[in-house]
């Protein structure tokens, strides 16, 4: 997070909020499973193996969809120069599919599309095959915030270096609160809103891709 410029950080915060929003909707829609937090689903899968076949199959399906989304997002970013917009186009399309499937009653297919979208979203800030910012899972980000606070207290680092990490976590929490409220109040309309936010992020990402193209262009 600290390696991003101001515009990229703003986009990262929006995408983290979107991830929280979508995960809360998926959690309610599927009944206690996650569409962006695969550690939780891995635990559900393991417990389900010992207690409930339906549970482990649902968890396994979501994990597989997320994993395929990660691969698709990463490949898209590698193949297309305007990485941010390319990846977010994939995310937007997947969210539109999820909303359409939910409208027609195919809730599990919708959940798979949500998990695919969240997997793909993590490739937005990928560089040299490594994710610079984790957008849909916050354990590592939370740990980094704590480490930066400890370093600041020890006098070894910038005393404000923890703030970007904490803001990312707070963005996800805020998005989840809004997503849960939207799902309860408006049902499937909440997913169309998610697709709209993703589309807005897609448009905003054009600025970052233009800057990147200019910075990497050969000088005359």
Image (spheres, rainbow, N blue to C red):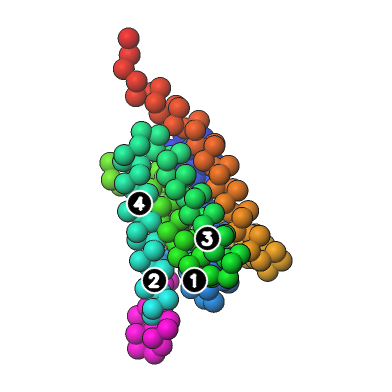
Q: Which residue is mark 2?
A: 61
Q: Is residue 71 magenta?
A: no
Secondary structure mostly seen in magenta is: helix
Q: Nearer the viewer, residue 24 or 190?
A: 190
Q: Residues within 10 Å of mark 1 (few under 14, many from 20)?
A: some
- Residue 61 in view of the camera: yes
* Alpha carbon separation for disc pair 1 and 3: 9 Å
Query: For the C terminus, which image quadrant?
Result: top left
Label 1: which secondary element: helix
* Alpha carbon separation for disc pair 2 and 4: 16 Å
Could you tell whether 139 is left or right of 79 in the image? right
* Alpha carbon separation for disc pair 1 and 2: 9 Å
Q: Nearer the viewer, residue 157 or 79?
A: 79
- Numbered label tally: 4
* Alpha carbon separation for disc pair 2 and 3: 15 Å
Q: Which residue is mark 3?
A: 98
Q: Which residues are magenta?
A: 40-55
Give the numbered dot on residue 72. 4
Percent across and percent down for residue 155 are 41, 45
């Amino acid at each position: 997070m600290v390696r991003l410029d101001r515009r990229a950080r703003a986009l990262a915060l929006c995408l983290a909020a979107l991830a929280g929003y979508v995960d809360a909707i998926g959690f309610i829609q599927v009944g206690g499973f996650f569409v962006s937090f695969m550690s939780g689903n891995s635990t559900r899968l393991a417990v389900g193996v010992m207690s409930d076949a339906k549970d482990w199959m649902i968890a396994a399906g979501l994990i597989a969809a997320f994993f395929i989304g990660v691969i698709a997002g990463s490949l898209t970013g590698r193949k297309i120069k305007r990485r941010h917009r390319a990846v977010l186009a994939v995310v937007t399309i997947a969210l539109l599919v999820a909303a359409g499937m939910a409208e027609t009653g195919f809730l599990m297919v919708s959940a798979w599309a949500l998990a695919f979208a969240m997997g793909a979203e993590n490739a937005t800030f990928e560089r040299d095959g490594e994710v610079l910012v984790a957008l849909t899972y916050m354990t590592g980000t939370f740990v980094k915030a704590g480490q930066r606070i400890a370093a600041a207290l020890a006098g070894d680092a910038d005393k404000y270096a923890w703030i970007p990490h904490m803001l990312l976590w707070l963005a996800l929490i805020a998005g989840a609160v809004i997503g849960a409220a939207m799902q309860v109040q408006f049902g499937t309309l909440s997913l169309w809103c998610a697709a709209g936010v993703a589309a807005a992020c897609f448009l905003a990402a054009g600025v970052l891709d233009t800057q990147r193209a200019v910075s990497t262009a050969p000088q005359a």
